[in-house]
Amino acid sequence: MQRLGARGDAAVTGETAMIDRRTILGASAAMAVTGAAAGVARATPLQRTTLQWPTREHFKLWPGGAPGAPATLPVPKRDGPEDGRELWMRGVAEPTVSVYRPAKPNGIGVLSIPGGGYSFVSVENEGAGVARVLNPLGYTVFVLTYRLPGEGWSQRADVPLQDAQRAMRLIRARAGSLGIDPAKLGILGFSAGGHLAASLTVGHADPVYTAVDAADRGDARPAFSGLVYPVTALTYDDKLNGSGRNLVGDVADPAILARYDTVARVTAQTPPIFLLHAADDGLVPLEMGLSMLTAARAAKVPVEGHFYEKGGHGFGMAADPAHPAHGWGALFATWVARHMAT
């Protein structure tokens, strides 16, 4: 696996690391103990999930209800893979942010945005799993459970971005009590959650909802943006992809497709970007990640890419030591720490 920096030059991973890779590998090995202490249930293919959602410490995004609500709200539903190894959420009527606090906070916050093709939210694999890895390194992790566009909300294409913007503004408004520096709040998105993270990265100021309180005067711009096997556009080979159909419906307005083509909207003002993808991803083509890398380089946006020959899709933090991307959290944590130190 080769690391590509903003100039495209190959580098040896870890030469300038501020966080030793062994730290994260040790944290991964001790995951069950750390997770239990933080109230995070460990899930493996050999046992069914016991994760409760939302977590004990969480907050709702919208007082009085989310914008564009249908006459009949979606009914919350917990499900997941057939073997029950992890939790997915559907029927999100009240979007929330779940809070995972580290024992020794470093002042940096990460809003984790799980994927699910905009048809469910993978809150365990790509939410709680993020906290298991990053909490031991001092990062405060916030997991967004966002509304799903196909569940009756008006302005369906904007619904996830409404929740992501609102989450960033509320976290910043409460930064003092949450133990983070509001200037050091970034995001980490996976798959369709990677599309939402990319949409927030380039569209953090898009006027997608009417302000509801003083928090909405705050900034939703992430200080850094991690995109893991991300969907970066709603079409591929000139056809709507699965996430695209779920976000906009079967008939797409060209203006909406253009607004959510995140690669095309990268500018010199875009926050630093971290990319991670497997070449054998059978759901989201590697070209999605590569196109974002190319756009960032062209706009002179700081960008770092990690691309694996094998790994597939949906591996989250790659907790399994046998997975090719195991330990990639160290790469992300080192990259974040480097950018937040400047």
Image (cartoon, rainbow, N blue to C red):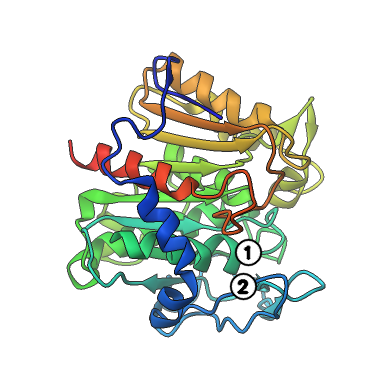
Dot 1 and dot 2 residues touching (CB under 8 Å):
yes
Residue at the disc numbered 2: 92
Instruction: Count up the numbered dots.
Output: 2
Q: Residues within 10 Å of mark 2 (few under 14, many from 20)?
A: many
Give the label, 1 or 2, closer to the camera: 1
Say whether disc 1 or disc 2 marks the residue closer to the N-terminus: 2
Q: Please, what is the three-letter code of the amino acid marked with disc 1?
A: Val
Above or below, 221 against 59 in this view is above
Q: Is residue 133 above or below residue 10?
A: below
Residue ID at (61%, 41%): 229
Which quadrant holds residue 297? top left
Q: Quadrant of residue 62?
A: bottom left
Q: The residue under label 2 is which amino acid type? A: Val
Mark 1 falls on what kind of element? loop
Q: Quadrant of residue 324?
A: top right
Q: Position of residue 259 (x, y in %)?
A: 56, 34
Q: CA distance from mark 1 to mark 2?
A: 9 Å
Give residue 35's position: percent from left, percent from top. 45, 75
Q: Is residue 74 visible?
A: yes
Q: Please say if 304 is above or below 180.
A: above
**Image coordinates for residue 151, horizontal then vertical, percent:** 71, 66
Q: Is residue 143 visible?
A: no
Residue identified by numbered label 1: 121
In the picture, measured across the screen, residue 241 lies left or right of residue 64, that is right
